[in-house]
Amino acid sequence: MSRYFFSKLIALLTGIILLVVAYIHNTNSLYYLSGDAYGTSWSISSSEYIADNHKDEIRNIISDIDFIASNYKSESEISQININFSESQFISKDLFNILKIAKDVEIVSEGFYNIMLGKVSSNLGFAPDFGQKVVQKKISSYELDEKNNSLIRYSNNWFDLSSIAKGYAVQKIHDYLTSNNLNNHLIDIGGELIISGTKKGEPWNIGIQNPLATIESSTITINNKNHDFLSIATSGEYRNYKFDDKGNKVTHTINPKTLSSITNNILSVTIVNETSATYADAYATAFNAMGVKKAIDVANSNNIASMIIFKDEDNVDIIYSDKWYDLFL
């Protein structure tokens, strides 16, 4: 065998080995995007390559929802509605969709979900007041005119969309990806999740945070082996709370019946929805405000998959709705 032929053979074998290594790497690696938004972080993991034009559109979606629903930007659509009271006004299509879903959840939750508690939230220090008076003395709601795409309200109570906007953004990103044949992904914005398709042929696995753990640890793992799509939302007071000057714990979830922070024994609520991250996000907050018994009753009456971690005297327990067992057994 000549030296020339031998060198050519070595080069060919090396090339084949490199191709095999590259193939193995590509079939086992995920494409990953991430950034900051809504006072938290977002990420997308996908087994499919997401081109630059799709990356730009995803960032545009996140930015657009921020300028519609942010309580912290005075120029956002919802902040302008809050500051400049009008009984009836035209609103954007996205805001209309958000408010429509919020109204559905308000009705199903028997009023335990109400997004017109923005002044209470601001007064408790969880949102800015923009130099306005933030005294809220009563509960109120709103109506939507679908024909004219308009909002009708009868009080100057403020909207607070922090319990639904992230879920809406997650859903909108998922809809965009699937419309472009990018069906296999995990989307996460501040703990509001969608798992879709597979992770290199295997189901996506999601760990639900143990609310009492001092380090990141999972209480239970959820996967979508029996479902092409699942949205997952968790609400709890184990991270977002403060203490007032009397040492009382003040939480970001407000009970609409009392107009004050919730005081029940729920540690966290996880909702799994087979069609919508927006509904999952809103229901998680609603059930968190209800208390254990009411939340399970409403979940079972409306076929909602929920897992509630709660403190029972000195013990921590978990209770599941009937729909949860239907999804995962």
Image (cartoon, rainbow, N blue to C red):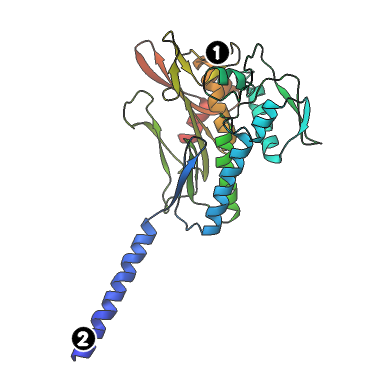
Tell me how far mark 1 sits from mark 2, CA to CA.
81 Å
Which residue is at the front of the view, 82 or 276? 82
Which residue is at the front of the view, 265 or 34? 34
The residue indicated by pointer 2 is: 6
Q: Indicate which label's residue lies in the foreground, 1 or 2.
A: 1
**Residue plotted at (59% across, 23% down):** 129
**Residue plotted at (47% across, 58% down):** 49
Q: Is residue 27 above or below residue 108?
A: below
**294 on left or right of 108:** left
Residue 294 location (% of width, % of height): 55, 16
View extreme (front): residue = 131
The residue indicated by pointer 1 is: 260
Q: Which element is circle 1 on? A: strand
View extreme (right): residue = 147
View extreme (top): residue = 246
Q: How many marks?
A: 2
Amino acid under disc 2: Phe
Residue 240 location (% of width, % of height): 45, 24
Amino acid under disc 1: Ser
Q: Is residue 76 visible?
A: yes
Q: Which image quarter holds the N terminus?
A: bottom left
Q: Which element is circle 2 on? A: helix
Count neighbours of disc 1 (C-alpha within 10 A) and say few if under 14, some if 14 to 19, many if 20 or more. some
Which residue is at the front of the view, 291 or 188? 188
Quadrant in which residue 108 is drawn = top right
Count neighbours of disc 2 (C-alpha within 10 A) and say few if under 14, some if 14 to 19, many if 20 or more. few
Check if mark 1's residue and mark 2's residue have beta carbons within 8 Å. Answer: no
Q: Is residue 296 visible?
A: no
Numbered circle sitting on residue 19: none
